[in-house]
Amino acid sequence: MEITVQQLAGMVNGTVEGDGNVIINNYAKIEEATPGCITFLANPKYTHYIYSTEASAVLVRKDFAPEQPVKTTLIRVDDPYATLAQLLNIANEMMKPKLVGIEQPSHIAEGVQLPDDVYVGAFAYIGKGVKVGKNVKIYPQVYVGDGVEIGDDVTLYPGVKIYHGCKIGNRCIVQAGAVIGGDGFGFAPKPDGSYEKIAQIGIVILEDDVEIGSNTTIDRATMGATVIKRGVKLDNLIQVAHNVEIGENTVMAAQVGIAGSTKIGKNNMIGGQVGFAGHITVGDYNGIGAQSGVPNSVGSKQKLLGAPAINALEFARQNVYMKRLGEMYNDIKALKKEIEKLKSE
């Protein structure tokens, strides 16, 4: 792909400062960019790179004021990071292969109606009663169980497994190896110490614009539905247990684990390896730091860290105390010696 800086700026309502006829053919980080690349400056700590970068163009904020001459062309925009995301999405769409048709060998159950613009890769399996929307891409080795419903513009990457009865909304993306609708972890203890499996007869519902990362697993409900609401983004290797509900536009980094029947609200930002106990509720607009453990219900608009998770400022304060424990221990030993000496006298 080759395009001029001026053309790029027109696509994102940016203002060019410099040579608008420079050709752009690639993207790169500001410290690694070479001629022909476009990059961005969003974090102030990278500002020094703008004076040495080899990039042909840099996206900057409209109010950016260089402290020394800049040799590259600037494109001034409201939000450089969001603008870069917009440009990357445009480039991705342009470079994507236009896959249409049904490859062989694949299995499509009798009676399943597929739109003309569908793509079904080799060794895919589509079960009985499946409903598939427009412009759906089902990559090789995907399993779609009986009665599954898939909306429009959905992409299921290689090796995705969607168990029977689950529902996938419009514009969802499920990355390779994810499992949607496996059995929830339900076992009843028996008097002899063994366990009897509890049938998991519910489903999983992914609402519109959900993205599920590679090898993430979302368990079907014991009864009812495990629900991932509109706009949720889940990273790789996340475990969502049965009957969990995740609210709109919540994002989670890798290796989060959510125990059964927990309800998480909307617009939460959850770091990697956070663990949630079962049967609790988490409010809206929280930020929960990496490796936190959440054993109890949480309100809204909180910043939490630690295990058990507490207010981030309190966690930082406790960390300071922890670092001084050795010093405090020595002080206490010295004080005890002084007290014993005074007693003996």
Image (cartoon, rainbow, N blue to C red):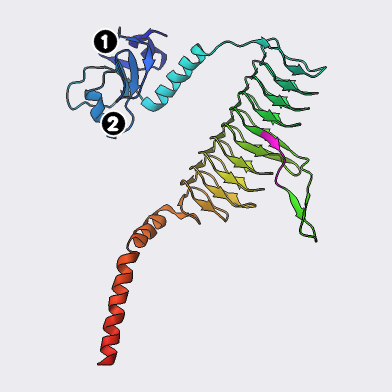
| Numbered badge on residue 317 | none
Q: Residue at x 33, y 70 (%)?
A: 329
Disc nearer the start of the sequence (1/2)? 1
Q: Residue at x 44, y 19 (%)?
A: 88
- The reply, left or right, for residue 337 in relation to residue 311 is left
Please provide percent x and percent y for residue 121: 66, 16
Span colored in magenta = 180-185
How many other residues sit within 10 Å of disc 2, few (<14), some (14-19) or many (≥20)?
few
Q: Distance between the Cα atoms at labels 1 and 2?
A: 23 Å
Residue placed under numbered mark 2 in the picture: 46
The single residue placed furthest to the right in the displayed view is 110
**Residue 263 sits above or below residue 136 on the image:** below
Residue placed under numbered mark 1 in the picture: 19
At label 2, which amino acid type do we have?
Answer: Tyr
Please name whichever residue, 188 or 57, is drawn nearer the observer in this view of the structure. Answer: 188
Mark 2 secondary-structure assignment: helix
